[in-house]
Image (cartoon, grey):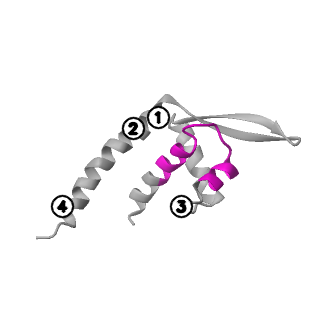
Amino acid sequence: MDIQIKRGLLDVCVLAAIKNKDSYGYQIIKDMKPYMQISESTLYPILRRLEEGGFLTVYSVEHNGRLRKYYRITKNGLRRLNEFTDEWKEIMQVYQFITRED
């Protein structure tokens, strides 16, 4: 798969993982596991990029004497998910064209 396509898909998948509830890194990996494998070394740069892009915010909560970073989707993040849904419809039309039987 093209690296740029995969990068965009991973970004959207991470946003989808926190769409309904705030979460932290390890939990995001667990939530995504049934659908795709993602490592910590892949996830954390994505989270930083999404934060820098304004798609999510970060806050810390103490857990077992340590601070745990939680991620929350922003309005821009929700907008990006909606845009992706519209883009995916176009991608599916192209896919149907490419795979059609003559």
Three-letter amino acid code of the residue under disc 1:
Leu
Binning the other alpha carbons within 10 Å of mark 4 as few (below 14), some (14 to 19) or many (20 upward) gives few
Q: Give the side of residue 79 with respect to residue 63, left or right.
A: left
The answer to which of marks 4 and 3 sits earlier in the sequence is: 3
Binning the other alpha carbons within 10 Å of mark 1 as few (below 14), some (14 to 19) or many (20 upward) gives some
Q: Looking at this view, name the residue that lies furthest to the right.
A: 65
The residue under the point 39% across, 38% down is 82
- Is residue 11 covered in magenta? yes
Residue for badge 4: 97
Q: Which mark, residue 82?
A: 2
x and y, in percent, of residue 74 in the image = 53, 31
The quadrant the N terminus occupies is bottom left
Label 1 secondary element: helix
Q: Give the side of residue 87 with respect to residue 26, left or right.
A: left
Q: Are marks 4 and 1 in contact (CB under 8 Å)?
A: no
Majority secondary structure in the magenta region? helix
The residue under the point 48% across, 36% down is 77
**Disc 3 and disc 2: Cα gap in Å?**
21 Å
The answer to which of marks 3 and 1 sits earlier in the sequence is: 3
Q: Are marks 1 and 2 in contact (CB under 8 Å)?
A: yes
